Image (cartoon, helix red, strand yellow):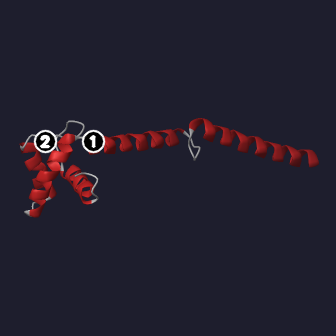
Amino acid sequence: MAIADRERVLISIRTQQAVEARRVRVGEWRVGGPNAKKAAAGLRGAQLSKEMAEDNENSRRASALIRMLRSNGNTLNQIAEQLNLAGFKTPRGFDFSGMQVQRLIKRIESNKLV
């Protein structure tokens, strides 16, 4: 029985070392299965999208129009329609929707987009 207890402790130590080695190698705090990789890739993609939007000159010009339309009391969808009619595109080259307008408004309000 003492041998089994000792083996259990050794297995635990080896497992902890393997997890720590993976954290160092991969750079993840949590080690998980395939979903952990997808989640990490999704976070990197979301961060890239934010950076693209903040660096996009088109978004900066659109913010002035958004401020004006918002002060006139237009809805998010109405603002998106006006942006699309004016030829503005999202950072990925698509037409604006109400959700993208809402995100731009949040960036404008947090002074990330001037």
Total marks in image:
2
Label 2 is placed on what type of residue? Phe
Q: Residues within 10 Å of mark 2 (few under 14, many from 20)?
A: some
Q: Residue at x 22, y 49 (%)?
A: 100
Which element type, helix, strand or loop, lies under badge 2?
Answer: loop
The circle drawn on residue 4 is none
Say if 63 sits above or below 40 in the image: below
Question: Visible in this render: residue 44?
Answer: yes
Q: Residue at x 76, y 40 (%)?
A: 14
Q: Residues within 10 Å of mark 1 (few under 14, many from 20)?
A: few
Q: How far apart are labels 1 and 2 at the CA level? A: 15 Å
Query: Horizontal and vertical percent for residue 91?
Result: 24, 39
Identify residue for label 2.
Answer: 88
Instruction: Name the side, left or right, on which 32 lies relative to 13.
Output: left
Name the residue furthest right.
2
Label 1 vs 2, first from the N-terminus: 1
Query: Horizontal and vertical percent for residue 4?
Result: 88, 46
Query: Horizontal and vertical percent for residue 75?
Result: 12, 59
Say if 7 sits above or below 114 in the image: above
- Could you say which quadrant of the image residue 94 lies in? top left
Label 1 is placed on what type of residue? Asp
Identify residue for label 1.
Answer: 55
Say if 65 sits above or below 24 in the image: below
Query: Horizontal and vertical percent for residue 13?
Result: 78, 44
Which element type, helix, strand or loop, lies under badge 1?
Answer: helix
